[in-house]
Amino acid sequence: FIPRHGSRHSIPPHLINYRANIWALKKIGIRKILATTAVGSLNPSMKPGDFVLADQFIDLTKSRISTFYEGGERGVVHVDMTHPYCPQLRREMKALANALNLSAHESGCYICTEGPRFETAAEVKAYARMGGDVVGMTGVPEAVLAREAEMCYVTVSMVTNFGAGISTENLTHKEVLDTMAQNGENIRNFIAQTIEHTETDSECDCHHALREFGGFKL
């Protein structure tokens, strides 16, 4: 388990060293990543307390390093991101969510913003029109780097609030923390059950994402 923001939540989303985190997991032999994110909802059907197993994302970040391949000795790769989250692992998690009687949406489009500020009401309206369902600050470039590293990656997004302009109240960090605390046991159980029921050695297309480039090299 790696807390992206540090053990004391001292690292803002735009300064997280996403490459170091993914590299470290790859280095110790991890093949599948279960990521959790707290998100605001752009979709009225995705309510606070719900879980969303995103199947797409739209990257609106601005200053983050999003690849292991920046030329030089490592060269350049163009990794396919048609399906950015592992379809196989998402299906398994949806089945588990049903068995646990959790309110989990089997698909959704995750909008990733730069942060650390919350969004304006106009931005939320625009993101919804773009096809976004939830909005957060940490899902990208994490998913891209995991794909380059040839690892299965899914994100379980916990809806903590409705986005600005949808909610009748101003957004606060406390609101996010309160919802996470109320739903904490559910997500811990969900992740624990997923780990217990997932075959860590099973093969997946994610493990061969850089086949045409000779595979990922540490």
Image (tube, rainbow, N blue to C red):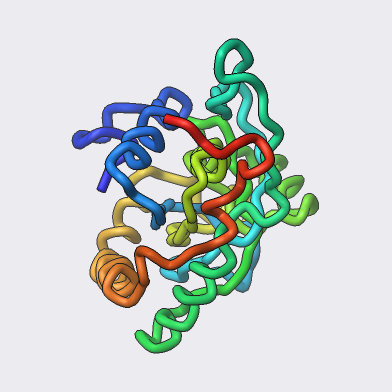
Q: Nearer the viewer, residue 88 or 216?
A: 216
Single out the residue that lies furthest toward the right.
129
* Left or right of 9 in this view: 127: right
Single out the residue that lies furthest toward the front.
214
Residue at coordinates 47% horizontally, 46% vertically from top-left?
A: 171
x and y, in percent, of residue 208 in the image: 57, 50
Tell me if residue 162 comes above or below residue 198 in the rendering. above
Tell me if residue 149 comes above or below residue 91 in the rendering. above
Tell me if residue 212 comes above or below residue 207 in the rendering. above
* Left or right of 97 in this view: 8: left
Q: Nearer the viewer, residue 182 or 152?
A: 152
Tell me if residue 44 comes above or below residue 57 in the rendering. below
Displayed quadrant of residue 121? top right
x and y, in percent, of residue 25 in the image: 33, 41
Q: Quadrant of the C terminus?
A: top left
Residue 167 can be seen in this image: no
Q: Nearer the viewer, residue 200 or 15?
A: 200
Displayed quadrant of residue 156? bottom left
Residue at coordinates 42% horizontally, 23% vertically from top-left?
A: 15
* Left or right of 44 in this view: 169: left
x and y, in percent, of residue 113 in the image: 59, 36
Residue at coordinates 32% horizontally, 35% vertically from top-left?
A: 24
* Left or right of 124 in this view: 197: left
Residue at coordinates 43% horizontally, 52% vertically from top-left?
A: 38
x and y, in percent, of residue 47 in the image: 52, 69
